[in-house]
Amino acid sequence: MKETVAAERDKASTGLDKVLDKASTELGTSSSKYVLPRVTPDMRMRRLRSKAPLRAMVRETHLRLEQLIYPFFIVEGKGIKTPIKSMPGIHQQSIDEMLKEAEEAVNLGLSSVLLFGIPSSKDSQATGAWSDDGIVQRATRELKKRFPDLMVIADTCLCEYMDHGHCGLVHDGKVLNDPSLEILARSAVSQAAAGADIIAPSDMMDGRIAAIRAALDANGFENIPIMAYSAKFSSALYGPFREAAESAPQFGDRKSYQMDPANGREALREVELDIQEGADIVMIKPALPYLDVISQTRNLTKLPIAAYNVSGEYSMVKAAAANGWIDEQKVVMECLTGIVRAGADLVITYHAKDVAQWLKQPG
Ligand code: PBG
Ligand code: ZN
């Protein structure tokens, strides 16, 4: 029996030997030139890669529709849908237009959206961030009225509403920490009152998770979760977003509150603190240059982790795809799968609608 198998194998390999001999003659190499180590049975990693259904069976990571969060940029007015040049496919839009796109998102099977507001007037107190008829508050009410099952996540920050474009109160050219907490908390409470399902503070002031948690609880919103932008790096990849949200700082930069991109251990301290302060979901932002931080956060906590695939990451892919330099669908799926493989449970991405389509009809 054993011999028969061996004989069969020899017979099969005769054909193969001929092919190899022919190849080495053509290449001018001789099969005896190198002494190659034998490929042992335990080295055969390619066994599980031989057929598509087999590859699918052993695939470890699956991007799911429910993991995707789609951002909206909302402006005052009616019938407004202004393309953002550096982010093809993404618009600043008035509430009526946003509702149409929300319906599209719902029909595609997306479960959540993230709201950024661009008020018509800005001031030094970020009034638009916490007034009951602020742009995000109104958009939230309209969205929840029409799509009660769509999870509305409110971005809680001040930069879009401040005339100076910083994420906190400014005095003498400095961004103040503690006084900013009061308005951030007010803003979060007004968003929850408008019906927001999740509060997402992106300002990076110290102690804001504790402040917002306390304010929500004191106002009867103890069941509204906080998704904390815990490790938000001071990144050049936010450039296109600042065009979209009209939130670029008018002086200086955000380095006194956002993190140094070089600091991984400090990022974990930020995550730990936000958890102590009461965060329900922790976020790492941006995503792709910080996969190590996502992965280390995965080992640090059992809380859900969100990753923000930011505007610059989107623009780079879009620009290369528009030039025909990369295959957009394949690159996007690879990037987002990588973010999930690193440990993210949720991914905020401007590609969400496209991905929803692709997941329905795999290309
Ligand atoms: C503002 C804010 C920014 C982003 C989300 N919220 C920009 C910034 O901090 O300057 C970036 C999102 C993106 O680039 O897609 N607090
Ligand atoms: Zn901000």
Image (spheres, grey):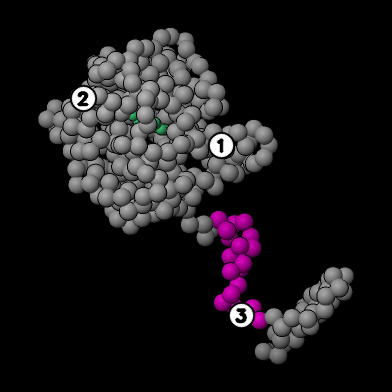
Query: Label 1 amino acid?
Result: Met
Tell me residue 292's x, y (percent).
41, 53
Q: CA distance from mark 1 to mark 3?
A: 43 Å
Query: Label 2 amino acid?
Result: Ile
Asked whether residue 198 is in view, the answer is: no
Query: Which mark sits nearer the N-terminus, 3 or 2?
Result: 3
Residue at numbered disc 2: 183
Residue 40: assigned label: 3
Residue 316: assigned label: 1
Tell me residue 325's x, y (percent).
67, 40
Q: CA distance from mark 3 to mark 2?
A: 66 Å
Residue ID at (40%, 16%): 75
Tell me residue 188's x, y (percent).
23, 27
Q: CA distance from mark 1 to mark 2?
A: 35 Å
Local crowd at mark 1 within 10 Å, few (<14), some, or many (≥20)? some
Tell me residue 314's x, y (percent).
52, 35
Q: Check the image and name the residue furthest to the top.
A: 78
Query: Label 3 amino acid?
Result: Thr
Is 78 or 322 nearer to us in this picture?
322
Residue ID at (43%, 26%): 242
Local crowd at mark 2 within 10 Å, few (<14), some, or many (≥20)? many
Residue ID at (27%, 50%): 269
Which portion, as a residue range, is magenta?
Answer: 37-56
Residue 266: assigned label: none
| Label 3 SS | loop
